């Protein structure tokens, strides 16, 4: 007799994690050197995301050009096969996806030093191959990594994470089963600070519990930032040692 | 691809000469190296990722659904998404319809392998995502589809085959899977330059080609669709029928080797 | 193609410097929401909301329809927040994919539809075949900022004001009673979400905001149009009187300290309390006005107090 217990009395979640454990986080950068100026591939739990950054480059239409700063565009391609159930129709013009794209643009517009790339356009192309909850957080992480790989100047990392609230227990880094069972809060945290670039709550949550959930989310986001930083430094170290063996 | 007048002239002259001189030194029937990875999407029944040596990349996902085969005519459906192109762009729609014809159940693919019971069969959804492409991607996509289908596992049926008398929905084993065994067709693309036929044309070769040929290969022989396709906007010319014969002979000679190397992944 | 409003450099410098010195253009304090004027029309579900110079009108209507196949016990509910150049020449007609338009409609949808403010199960008539399809149409008449807040108030007031025709079900046949035959029935409202929008300004430079520790960003409640054009970030919080946060949307923009955002949520709560009470009070007054002869027409006996 097996029941699907979101949070067992022993403190274990459906996938065996504890309330404050992140899912498996694997990332690599410069995965598509031919297709883009900067690229990253990351897996957060079962989320598999390819992020390509093309730019700074000349805009296709001169009329779109801004003489004082670069223009940032984000396109998110949620594939039809990303979820367990294949989607019948394309998500390209869905309002939910447009909202995600706008949020991502507005987040990184404040983080990337656009004013040092005037008259150019930076295109960010994202392909979601598989999603299993907390997708917004993973999109943010993928973009941060790809922008760094592209060598585009920015002020700090932005790390994304989602936290759910199951009755009174906060659960860090929710997967899709958990997202369907409770309200989740998605945060985009700037570097090691407590400043939020993104705060997204889409389902009801008691006002008095929100602060605690935010605190746990920020701590989780800091850990994600450290994981990304570790991977980036490892990659840089490899590139430096490859370049200097001669 | 933007090439200067001098580059185009040099390329055309060397490709059209006898014997044909390709910029990377390949023989007319030689393919460039490719990398294929399979089975990396656990939520799909099969998946493959192909990376060509010029950086072109394509990902294919295979998903299945149980359908009533008296209602559904087509048991294989291909859907192509090329990054950066609209869904109704000409190149996307032509490739999608071509691949659907190639993989049409009954003529292209033996769909008896997909049947589950007297009433139900599996419907296979082939979703193609082309991340980047520098020349006509149809051949690359077909290699990816071939590898994906050949590494696809479908759930194993445990309920009865005859479900017309006693109406029941098919039920499946919790863990065991069955490898999908259909012989997927391949699509080859050739470039026509002067009097020469070249297999696996690179981006710069396609840019100066006079024409292109799309030839399908299934079950050890050439099959339809066979089409001509313009590989660029500037150099398109008609070609003599003997070149078509030459192209078909080339595919007949070298396709089995390609199939063998894809099988031995 | 609509032309964006271009605010002059002197005007923008003036407004920003005034904010640094704790002044707002209309004299409000930073945490003061504009006075909300709600007017109900003659028909049920006809509401006009006025906040300063922002005017918004909402009409609720309903008709019989077939429920979705995968939700046979629920009715249909659609909110339309299409903007037109009537509100201002910077808006384009029918542009539903513009960034701000998408954010506005998504926030209203999350606040009202997704949160279940309207009981859709109560709209079901015959499971799987007939249900009420309720439609809320928001018309933007004049733009001076605060469209999201004003539309949410208008939609909620409209839904609470609206009454649908009474129906009798005979098997598969439904009889819809005209309004003059039988009293129309109000909709089931499960909670009253109200949105409050905060706008953020950075008085120093970007470096200080991201790397510094001073947290000196300015936050104001309910920005007017000029303040909206100059803001660096925006947060929209939706709450109800049950102390529940219905939705929060800070879609990028100026990074703000988490504690400041929490403070904003708490400030928002005291504001929505007042607005909710105001809406309920006005609904009560409207219903009393409509039934002003109720005391005379009732057949109740006189009661000793």
Image: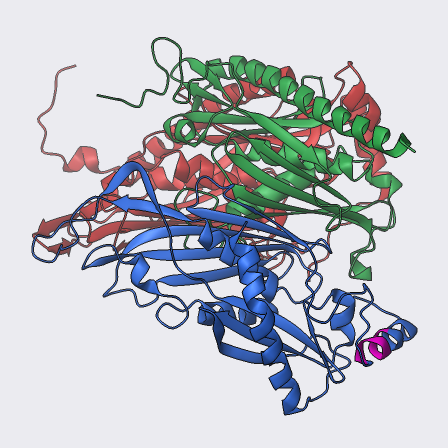
Chain colours: A green, B blue, C red
- For residue B125, above or below residue A197: below
Camera-side residue of B154 and A228:
B154
Q: Which residue is drawn at 23% across and 66% down?
A: B70
Residue C38 seen in this snapshot: no
Camera-side residue of B55 and A159:
B55
Camera-side residue of B264 and B6:
B264
Could you tell whether B169 is left or right of B257 in the image? left
Q: Which residue is drawn at 65% across and 58% down?
A: B84
Q: Which residue is drawn at 65% across and 26% down?
A: A159
Asked if the magenta segment contains residue B15, the reply would be yes
Q: Position of residue B260 (x, y in %)?
A: 54, 59
Range of magenta residues: B11-16
- For residue C279, above or below residue B132: above
Asked if the magenta segment contains residue B165, the reply would be no
What's the magenta bit mostly, secondary-structure-wise?
helix
Could you tell whether A20 is left or right of B235 in the image? left
Q: In which quarter of the image is the N terminus of chain B?
A: bottom right
Q: Position of residue A212 (x, y in %)?
A: 52, 12
Total marks in image: 0
Q: Where is residue C147 in the image (x, y as percent from the top left)?
A: 57, 41
Q: Where is residue A143 in the image (x, y as percent from the top left)?
A: 68, 37
């Amino acid at each position: 007799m097996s029941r699907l217990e979101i949070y067992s009395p022993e403190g274990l979640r459906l996938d065996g994690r504890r309330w404050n454990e992140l899912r498996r986080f694997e990332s690599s950068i410069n995965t598509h050197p031919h297709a883009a100026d900067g690229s990253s591939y990351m897996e957060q739990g079962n989320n598999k995301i390819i992020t390509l950054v093309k730019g700074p480059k000349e805009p296709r239409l001169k009329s779109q050009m801004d003489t004082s700063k670069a223009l940032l565009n984000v396109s998110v391609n949620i594939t039809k096969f990303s979820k367990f159930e294949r989607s019948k129709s394309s998500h390209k013009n869905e309002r939910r996806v447009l909202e995600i794209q706008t949020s991502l643009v507005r987040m990184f517009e404040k983080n990337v030093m656009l004013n040092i790339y005037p008259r150019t356009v930076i295109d960010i192309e994202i392909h979601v191959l598989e999603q299993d909850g907390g997708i917004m957080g993973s999109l943010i992480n993928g973009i941060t990594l790809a922008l760094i790989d592209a060598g585009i100047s920015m002020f700090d990392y932005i790390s994304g994470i989602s936290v759910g609230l199951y009755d009174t227990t906060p659960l860090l880094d929710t997967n899709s089963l958990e997202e369907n069972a409770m309200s989740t809060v998605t945060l985009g945290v700037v570097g090691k600070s407590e400043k939020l670039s993104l705060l997204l709550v889409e389902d009801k949550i008691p006002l008095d519990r929100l602060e605690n959930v935010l605190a746990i989310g920020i701590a989780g986001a800091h850990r994600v930032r450290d994981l990304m930083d570790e991977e980036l430094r490892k990659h840089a170290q490899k590139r430096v040692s490859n370049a200097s063996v001669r | 691809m933007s090439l200067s007048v001098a580059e185009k002239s040099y390329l055309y002259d060397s490709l059209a000469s006898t014997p044909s001189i390709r910029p990377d030194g390949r023989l007319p029937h030689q393919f460039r190296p490719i990398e294929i990875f399979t089975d990396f999407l656990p939520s799909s029944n099969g998946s493959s990722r192909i990376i060509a040596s010029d950086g072109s990349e394509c990902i294919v996902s295979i998903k299945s659904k149980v359908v009533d085969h008296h209602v559904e005519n087509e048991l294989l459906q291909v859907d192509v998404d090329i990054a950066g192109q609209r869904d109704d762009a000409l190149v996307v729609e032509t490739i999608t319809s071509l691949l659907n014809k190639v993989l049409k159940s009954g003529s292209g693919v033996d769909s008896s392998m997909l049947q589950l019971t007297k009433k139900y069969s599996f419907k296979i959804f082939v979703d193609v995502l082309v991340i980047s492409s520098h020349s006509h991607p149809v051949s690359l996509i077909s290699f990816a589809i071939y590898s994906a289908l050949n590494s696809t596992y479908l759930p194993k049926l445990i309920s009865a085959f005859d479900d017309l008398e006693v109406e029941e929905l098919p039920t499946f084993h919790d863990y065991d899977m069955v490898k999908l065994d259909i012989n997927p067709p391949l699509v080859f693309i050739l470039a026509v330059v002067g009097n020469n036929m070249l297999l696996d044309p690179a981006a710069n070769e396609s840019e100066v080609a006079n024409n292109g040929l799309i030839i399908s290969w299934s079950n050890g022989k050439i099959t339809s669709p066979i089409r001509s396709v313009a590989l660029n906007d500037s150099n398109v010319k008609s070609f003599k029928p003997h070149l078509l014969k030459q192209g078909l002979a080339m595919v007949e000679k070298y396709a089995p080797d390609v199939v063998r190397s894809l099988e031995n992944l | 193609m609509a032309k964006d409003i271009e605010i002059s450099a002197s005007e923008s410098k003036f407004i920003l410097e005034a904010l640094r010195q704790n002044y707002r253009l209309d004299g409000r304090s930073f945490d003061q929401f504009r006075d909300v004027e709600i007017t109900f029309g003659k028909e049920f579900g006809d509401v006009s909301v006025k906040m300063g110079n922002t005017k918004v009108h909402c009409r609720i209507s309903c008709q019989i329809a077939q429920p979705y196949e995968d939700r046979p016990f629920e009715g249909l509910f659609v909110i339309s927040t299409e903007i037109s150049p009537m509100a201002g020449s910077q808006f384009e007609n029918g542009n539903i994919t513009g960034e701000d338009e998408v954010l506005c409609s998504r926030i209203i949808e999350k606040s009202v539809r997704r949160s279940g403010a309207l009981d859709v199960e109560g709209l079901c008539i015959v499971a799987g075949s007939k249900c009420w399809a309720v439609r809320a149409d928001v018309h933007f008449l004049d733009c001076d900022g605060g469209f999201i807040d004003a539309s949410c108030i208008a939609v909620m007031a409209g839904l609470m004001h609206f009454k649908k025709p009474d129906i009798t079900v005979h098997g598969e046949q439904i009889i819809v009673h005209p309004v003059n035959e039988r009293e129309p029935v109000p909709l089931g409202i499960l909670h009253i979400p109200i949105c409050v929008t905060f706008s953020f300004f950075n008085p120093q430079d970007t470096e200080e905001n991201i790397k510094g520790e001073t947290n000196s960003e300015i936050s104001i409640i309910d920005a007017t149009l000029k303040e909206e054009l100059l803001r660096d970030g925006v947060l929209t919080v939706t709450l109800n009187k049950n102390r529940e946060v219905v939705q929060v949307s800070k879609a990028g923009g100026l990074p703000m300290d988490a504690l400041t955002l929490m403070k904003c949520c708490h400030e928002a709560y005291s504001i929505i309390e007042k607005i909710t009470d105001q809406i309920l009070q006005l609904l009560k007054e409207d219903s009393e006005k409509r039934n002003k002869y109720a005391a005379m027409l009732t057949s109740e006996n006189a009661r000793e107090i």
